[in-house]
Image (cartoon, rainbow, N blue to C red):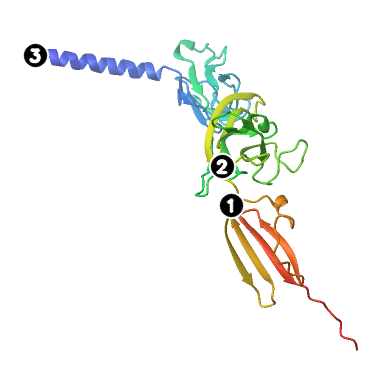
């Protein structure tokens, strides 16, 4: 019984040492598979010396690794047997890549490299993904909601309007969207030197006020990648909620020491400044001795109606 036990231990030990020896004799890449991202580092290990000691850390040294499809990267020999790679991109969303050895490589002693020591390594870029921080407020969905979109890749702003739109959840009726850049709060325009062409975040608003009492979705149906300039098939739907009509929630008045009066109107959603005019908002009975000013706070739901007294200035005569 003791002999059998010793025999099994010896066999296990021999198998373990054989596997370790095979691993030491193989050409390895770490990481050996998985996701590939911009800025990622990889290390390639050879079992025998490939370059001279004086070539370590210098440019122009042989590059033993290639990617299919092609990827841009930097590489540097850390030792005679180790190469460090840094992925510079562009990485195509969802693309599968294969790391393979360059052909016709020779070891330092001049003998051909044994390619049986290598297995091609598979990698894949993360799929395109978009998320939003939009949250429905207690008053329901406004007729002109502003929806922020955050992407995990840089996309082309121009053309995004063609594939991003609002939609009635029930009837599938589409409503065009305007794209706004968060840095400038403006729409992207072709050949505008101030506006960036690519980025990973934007705001979407309806081109026209949405009809009320509709359940609205925001739909992304394809995105043009910034690096490859190709349209990537991608479908994402964000349910936004049910649109509510514009309502006046409350009003406040404040009077300063000079007799000026300010009326603050608070609504359940943002108000379009273009629609706030003397024709739609007035004080009755009309106050003749006051000068009326309308001010809309686009960052909140307030409209300020400011009444200032006319003050006539009469210069003192010497």
Q: CA distance from mark 2 to mark 1?
A: 12 Å
Label 3: few (<14), some (14–19) or many (≥20) C-alpha neighbours in 10 Å: few
At horizontal 77% and vertical 40% (from top left) the residue drawn is: 192
Labelled pair 1, 3 in contact (Cβ < 8 Å)? no
Left or right: 15 in relation to 123: left
Secondary structure under the numbered disc 1 in the rendered image: loop
Picture quadrant of residue 168:
top right
- Whole-percent x, y for residue 137 in the image: 51, 48
- On the rendered image, what quadrant is the N terminus found in? top left
Label drawn at residue 91: none
Q: Is residue 102 above or below residue 83?
A: above
Residue 5 is situated, as x and y percent measured from the top left of the image, at: 14, 16
Query: Can you tell which mark lies on residue 247?
Result: 1
Q: Is residue 83 shown left or right of residue 318?
A: left
Please state the horizontal and vertical placement of residue 159, each as a whole percent of the image.
69, 31
Residue wearing tag 3: 1
Give the mark nearest the N terminus, 1 or 3.
3
Indicate which label's residue lies in the foreground, 3 or 2: 2
Asked whether residue 54 appears in the rendered view, the answer is: no
The reply to whether the C-beta atoms of the residues labelled 3 and 2 are less than 8 Å apart is: no
Reply above or below: 278 against 200: below
The one of 99 and 130 positioned closer to us in this rendering: 130
Residue 241 place in picture, x, y as percent: 52, 40
Q: CA distance from mark 1 to mark 3?
A: 90 Å
Residue underneath mark 2: 243
Within 10 Å of disc 1 (Cα), the crowding (few <14, some 14-19, many 20+) is few
How many numbered tags mark residues here?
3
* Front residue of this view, candidates 266 and 204: 266
Q: What secondary structure is marked by label 2?
A: loop
In front: label 1 or label 3: 1
Which numbered disc flags the more N-terminal residue, 3 or 2?
A: 3
- Look at 75% across and 38% down and name the residue there: 189
């Amino acid at each position: 019984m003791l002999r059998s036990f010793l025999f099994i231990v010896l066999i296990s030990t021999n198998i373990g040492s054989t596997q370790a020896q095979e691993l030491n004799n193989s050409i390895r890449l770490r990481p050996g598979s998985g996701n590939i991202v911009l800025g990622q580092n990889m290390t390639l290990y050879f079992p025998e010396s490939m370059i001279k000691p004086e070539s370590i850390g210098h440019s122009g040294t042989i590059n033993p690794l290639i990617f299919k499809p092609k990827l841009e990267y930097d590489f540097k020999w850390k030792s005679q047997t180790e190469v460090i790679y840094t992925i510079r991109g562009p990485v195509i969303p969802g693309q599968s890549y294969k790391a393979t050895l360059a052909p016709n490589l020779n070891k330092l002693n001049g003998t051909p490299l044994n390619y049986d020591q290598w297995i091609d390594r598979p990698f894949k870029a993360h799929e395109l993904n978009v998320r939003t921080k939009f949250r429905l407020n207690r008053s329901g969905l406004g007729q002109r909601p502003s929806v922020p979109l955050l992407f995990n890749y840089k996309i082309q702003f121009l053309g995004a309007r063609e594939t991003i739109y609002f939609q009635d959840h029930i009837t599938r009726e589409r409503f065009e969207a305007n794209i706004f850049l968060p840095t400038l709060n403006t729409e992207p325009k072709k050949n505008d030197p101030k506006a960036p062409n690519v980025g990973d975040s934007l705001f979407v608003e309806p081109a026209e006020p949405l009809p009320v009492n509709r359940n609205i979705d925001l739909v992304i149906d394809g995105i043009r990648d910034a690096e490859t300039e190709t349209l990537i098939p991608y479908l994402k739907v964000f349910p936004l909620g049910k649109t509510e009509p514009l309502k006046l929630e409350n009003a406040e008045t404040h009077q300063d020491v000079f007799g000026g009066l300010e009326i603050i109107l608070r609504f359940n959603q943002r108000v379009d400044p273009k629609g706030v005019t003397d024709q739609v908002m007035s004080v009755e009975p009309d106050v003749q001795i006051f000068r009326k000013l309308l001010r809309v706070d686009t960052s909140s739901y307030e409209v300020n109606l400011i009444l200032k007294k006319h003050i006539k200035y009469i210069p003192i005569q010497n």
